Image (cartoon, rainbow, N blue to C red):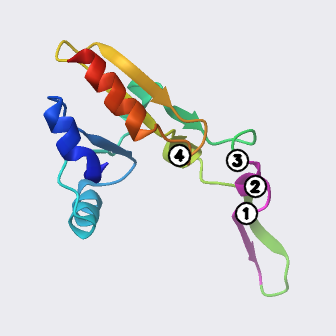
Amino acid sequence: MQEHVDAYAERNATSIAITAGQQLCEMREYAERSGITYPLLADEDWSVIKSYGIYHWFGLAAHNLAYNILRPATFISDKLGYPLYKRIGFASHSLSNGIARPATFIIDKLGIIRYMYIGSSQFDLAEQEEILEHLNSLT
């Protein structure tokens, strides 16, 4: 996105990146390391992600590999090897049970969504040329 900041500005648009579940200090460090100049929103409680409908439940259908093969496990036994505690699976709090789908929205000054692209996987991103074409159609 950084390489298109000037092209967005020419079309009276601003790019804003929203990250889910990350703290603001982490985002600042990332932006400084990566040379990002556009605004970043750290959506620590996932409220923005959920309001735009791009929160994706982290379950068997979405992440079978992570759930069935890489599933964390904790076993505690006494000195003789008798089990005292067993837990298999992810932590129960809601933030570990979801991800944000990659998405691009063009929202006009009135707050109306004029373009929306929601990826089907973490690598399915909107094409920058398509975004610029939609911005051109709005000017």
Would residue 26 appear left or right of 13 to someone viewing this image?
Answer: right
Mark 3 crowdedness (10 Å alpha carbons): few <14, some 14-19, many ≥20:
few
Mark in front: 1 vs 4: 1
> If you read the primary sequence from the N terminus, does the residue marked by circle 1 or circle 4 appear first?
1
> If you read the primary sequence from the N terminus, does the residue marked by circle 2 or circle 1 appear first?
2
Q: Position of residue 58 (x, y in %)?
A: 62, 42
Task: Provide the residue span drawn in magenta.
Answer: 64-78
Would residue 105 appear left or right of 84 to someone viewing this image?
Answer: left
Q: Are marks 2 and 1 in contact (CB under 8 Å)?
A: yes
Mark 1 crowdedness (10 Å alpha carbons): few <14, some 14-19, many ≥20:
few
Above or below — where is 71 with respect to 14? below
Q: CA distance from mark 2 to mark 3?
A: 5 Å
Which residue in the structure is indicated by mark 2? 65
Which residue type carries mark 3? His
Q: Position of residue 6 (x, y in %)?
A: 17, 44
Mark in front: 2 vs 4: 2
SS class, disc 2: helix
Image mark count:
4
Which residue in the structure is indicated by mark 4? 93
SS class, disc 1: loop
User: Which numbered disc covers residue 70?
Assistant: 1
* Residue at image location 53% in from the left, 43% down from the top: 99
Which residue type carries mark 1? Leu
> If you read the primary sequence from the N terminus, does the residue marked by circle 4 or circle 3 appear first?
3
Above or below — where is 137 with respect to 8? above
Q: Nearer the viewer, residue 90 or 62?
A: 62
Which residue in the structure is indicated by mark 3? 63
Q: CA distance from mark 2 to mark 1?
A: 7 Å
